[in-house]
Amino acid sequence: MAAETGLLSAPRLQPVAALSKAPGEPSGIPPCPPAATDTNFMLQFFRNFFNSRLGVAITLAIVGVIGLAFALADVSGSRSFGGVSGGDRVAMVGKARISTSELAQAAKSAFDNAREKNPQLTMKLFVAEGGLSQTLDQLIDRTAIAEYGRIHGIVAGDRLIDSEIAKIDGFRGTDGKFSETVYRQVLQQRGLSEAAVRGDISAGLIARQVLVPTAFGAVMPTELALRYAALLKERRSGAVALLPSAAFAPAAAPGDGEIAAYYAQHRIEYTRPERRVIRYAVFDGTALKAVAAPTEAEIAARYTANKANYTALEKRKLTQLILPTEAAARAVLAEIAGGKSIEAAAATKGLAAAPIGPLSRDELAAQSSSTVADAVFTAARGRVSGPAKGPLGWHVFRVDSVDQRAARTLDQARGEIVAALSAEKRRAALTDYLAGIEDKFDQGGNMTDAAKDLGVTPLLTDPLTADGKVYGAPTKPAPADLARVVSAAFAMERTNHPQLAEIEPGKKFVIFDVTDITPSAPAPLAEIKTDVTTDIQLQKGAALSRAAADKAVAAVRKGTDLGAAIAALGRPLPQVDRVDMGREQLTAMRQQVPPPIALLFSMAQGTVKLLAAPNNRGWYVVALKAIVPGTVSPADPLIGQAAKELGQITGREYAEAFRRAIRAEVGVTRNEAAIRAVGTQLTGGGN
């Protein structure tokens, strides 16, 4: 890389996350961030051109449908969402219908899954960012493939569906096997009908039969892979300039009317996350009153029940070799007597001596025979002995170690037994004590009384967000003792409903409830007026920045150096970054590739392009000066990797094309009014 590499290290290219702020925090005009790019493999740059929506469709079709049935719970027989304006169906796929209730349930479940990754996500944001549309597309694809299978006689039989149900972990009993009882209980708990579940699994199996063969076995020609492999070794040089919106923002502040209008139009962008205050009290086993000591009868009963643990016992480790005949065994013994080890003697016969044990006499007899066990337990330690007849042949062995345990009387074992019984009694008493606390909570008990009984003082947290951080101070986490209960606290439907949880299993516990809930909502304009003002100025500055960037682009296209073109704008702008790097360096950056650099590696030599920075932060001008082609030898392993990766991309393209063809053949009719109605009801009808 050239000396001027500020583009990759300058503060203005910090990750997007560094610019996030809660509404109401100090604003200012932060530098322009890049978006992360995914380069899991050297060919990922090209993969981005082909993936489109394919990954979602393939994942849904091949392995996702069964997951939808239980993770998304969109196969409920409920139709409680029906009746919204626009009709009771959002789409007709062939002769199959997708109801408003199906879409609503699937969207709610998809939102729940997304919220696990982003606790501050709201349903309004989810819908606004296309979550509802993506969910509907997935439902349409799944239904279309199932309809295609029905039309062409591709089915999933009952026995195949049964086998898939039996594979689902959630339907297994305590023995690890499929349990009909558990299966029925899960369906009842989730409000699922068996017919709907079986139908959804059937659709997934049909999708697997339809799409997997389409994508399987696609091969990319070696010559093409060679060209792509060489492309991955090319080198590019050029320049990148940033024209920040802040540098062009007007000096005059917007009026109150303009601020109010902008806020009304962008309210959703100023949404604050839900906050909750948790009241909690931590305690441990010391809260438990004195536990009765074990009685003499209990000690004697435990000794009798486990008498085998206190009798004399001898266990031995040995190395053994099993031979087919007694003569062969004696020949090996003769070699060992001549100075060879049992391992060396075995190796000369093409065999291997195996380590065994430690085993008691009875355990060894059960594995081989009493004759072998008697021989082993009468042999001297370290000596090779045999042969002894076993069910598999003649045993030659060496006793490697002897572990002898002397018998113990009741008095000798008393201390061990008392300690074990005392621990069991304390655990049982603690379990009962905790169960009593939960029973009181279930009967309407409150935190104050419970804390008083425990002898602890409840504490209050600062307002917390669902990700366990203090609101307004994202670097400050919730108390460590609450790490396991924040999610439970945010699942509570009301305040002052205490619960009990373990912090450290069997040792440390917490009782907690929620005292205050502040719902997620846009921040009041009065509290974030400065932020809104800044955003208005950035929007205006972005338009002026674009105009200036257009002038710079025009100058560069006429032969002016980018640095000179930027200087001619007459504004105090950041220095132009000179870039000289290879594509392999780009790949090594993985998800830290700045967008201008990614653009530089997709341009034609001698061209100049514009790139908008996110969130009205400005414009990049990217000029590519030269491309030095890469070279690769025919034996380079990169060619094989490229061929494999491109073959997978080709297969996915085949599957995507087939998916689109299935949609066209089956026929899809969308009910836009019903779709909008579902979105409105999910978001509560607001913006």
Image (spheres, rainbow, N blue to C red):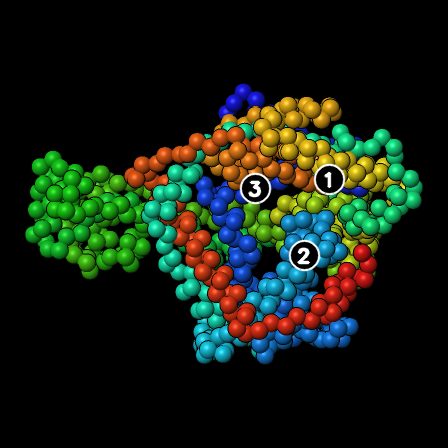
Q: Earlier in the sequence, mark 2 or mark 1?
A: 2
304 lies above or below 40: below
Comparing labels 2 and 1, the label whose residue is closer to the camera = 1
Q: Which mark is residue 475?
A: none
Percent of width and height locating residue 381: 24, 40
Give the SS element for disc 2: loop
Q: Which mark is residue 37?
A: 3
**Quadrant of the image occupied by residue 68:** bottom right
Give the crowd class for mark 2: few <14, some 14-19, many >=20 residues within 10 Å: few
Comparing labels 3 and 1, the label whose residue is closer to the camera = 1
Q: Earlier in the sequence, mark 3 or mark 1?
A: 3
**Label 3 to label 1: alpha-carbon separation:** 20 Å
Q: Earlier in the sequence, mark 3 or mark 2?
A: 3
Contact check, label 2 and label 1, Cβ < 8 Å: no
Q: Amino acid at mark 2?
A: Gly
Percent of width and height locating residue 299: 54, 52
| Res 589 visible | no
311 lies above or below 576: below
- For disc 2, the marked residue is 130
567 lies above or below 413: above
Percent of width and height locating residue 226: 35, 43
| Residue at the spot 17% in from the left edge and 47% down from the top edge | 351
Contact check, label 3 and label 2, Cβ < 8 Å: no
| Residue at the spot 51% in from the left edge and 65% down from the top edge | 659
Q: Amino acid at mark 3?
A: Thr
Q: Which mark is residue 616?
A: 1
